[in-house]
Each structure stands twice: as structure tokens, then as C-alpha cells.
Amino acid sequence: MIELSLLQIIVLSIIQAVTEFLPISSSAHLLLPSKVLGWPDQGIIFDITVHFATLLAVLVYFREQFLKISFYYSKIFLYLILSTVPIMLIVLIVEGVGDYRWSITSIAIANILFALLLYVSERFNTNMYENKNMTAQHALFIGVFQAFSLISGASRSGTAITGSMLLGYKKTDAAKYSLMLSIPTILGALVFSIKEIETLTEDVYILTTFIAFLTTFIVSYFSISVFLNLVNRLGYTPFIVYRIMLGIILLWLT
């Protein structure tokens, strides 16, 4: 891990934990410390650590479902895998797509545009479906939308939720499906990240790595609960407004 101060590790871990599951774009938020405060890039070890922590947090949160053997024989489990296929295919076929460094301007514009698309999906949502009504066609459609998250600033959870609501899924069901969909997606990201360890040149600091992991796990777990409660009470309007404001701030900083 690149040598960071304790404050930097905690702040960056909290940012990752909060933004991973909320439809507000983690890439845009991780840009702010480096742009405003001049902090260094976190490095591959930090990325692997926090992604593993967020993965564990969502597994623990939905543990009752995942501990049931019947879940792995259910259609929803197969649909989660199917929804992951589009983004994985693009990463495998388009060389370097996951490593492309987007400009701050493009990230800001993506934040605003995908926030507006989230607004449209909520505004015209028919609320016809629940996750128990999921079909293979719907799962693939949501997966295609999630693939837009390869554009920095689009937000993985935001694109998946947008796809769900455009199909007519209830807002809370869209949020829950997006959260569960993060599991195979993060696993895939971890596999690609771990491959990069072969060319690793940075040192590994055990204590700071543990602090990053623990902070990310705890904040991620509570972020999921807060997120679902907010969506249930207020919908996605707070996140839409926030993302548009963030995009404007990033444009102002460029």
C-alpha cells in the first residue's frame, strides 16, 4: 500500500464504503481528496483491501439469504450472475477499459447525466414488479445498464437501479437487487485487481491495511442499512440532487 497517513486512510476508506453502494459514484468522490487536498493515489493494495471489505459487508448484511442452500437453487441467484455477464464481457474483450483514466470534466458530466437518467427512471417508474418477478430478459437488461458504470462517474449501483426502475421495479426492490448484484461484480473486480499484484512495486503495511479493511467494513455495513431506509422513505431524489451538485462542483474545480 502506498504510504498514507492514518487520517488519509480513514477518510478514503469511509468514502469508498459510503459510495460503493449508494448511487452517487465512488470515482467522483475519490477524486476530491487528490484534487482539493493533493493526496496521492491510493494504490492497488488499498483498492483490493476496501473492495474485499465492501464485499464482506454485503455478504454479512444479507447473510440470512446467503446461508440458505435454497437461495443457490433459486432463479434470483442465476439472474444475478446473468446481470454480471455484460460488464465482464466488456472488460475481457475491450483491453484496458477498466484502467482508463477519465478526466475530471468527463466524470463530472457523467455524474450529472446519469443523475438525470436516474430521475427519469424514478419519475416514470410504473412500480409493476418486485424482485420475485425477475426474468432472464430483465436481468440482462439491468446488466447492460450496469455496464455503463465502466464510465467513471456513472455509478455502478446508480446504473443498475436505473435499469431496474426503467423496467418498472419498485424502488426498494431495485436498491436490494443492486446491492446483491455488487457481490459478483466486486468479486470480478477483485480477480482483475489481484492479477496486478504480479507487477506490484509498492510496499504492504499490515497495520494500515487492517485499519482500511476494518473502517470500510463497518461503514459499508451501516451504509447499506441507511441507504435502504432512505430509499424507502424519500426515494432517490436526495441522491439525484446531490450528484448534480457534485458534478457542478467538479466542473468548477477544473
Image (cartoon, rainbow, N blue to C red):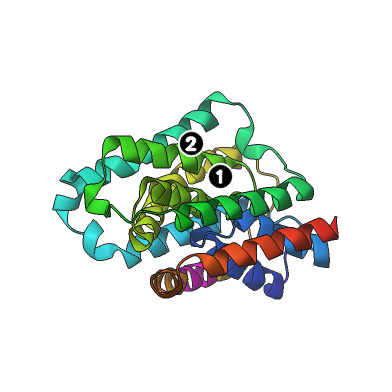
Could you say which quadrant of the image residue 205 lies in? bottom right
* Residue 132 placement (x, y as % from top left): 22, 52
Q: Amino acid at mark 1?
A: Ser
Q: Nearer the viewer, residue 200 or 160?
A: 160
Q: Is residue 46 magenta?
A: no
Residue tagged 1: 149
Reply above or below: 5 against 130. Answer: below
Name the mark on residue 205: none
Disc 2 to disc 1, C-alpha distance:
8 Å
Reply above or below: 5 against 140. Answer: below
Q: Nearer the viewer, residue 225 or 215?
A: 225
* Residue 128 placement (x, y as % from top left): 29, 53
Q: Amino acid at mark 2?
A: Ile
Q: Is residue 9 left or right of residue 156?
A: right
Residue tagged 2: 87
Which residues fall within the magenta stretch?
212-220
Secondary structure at badge 1 equals helix
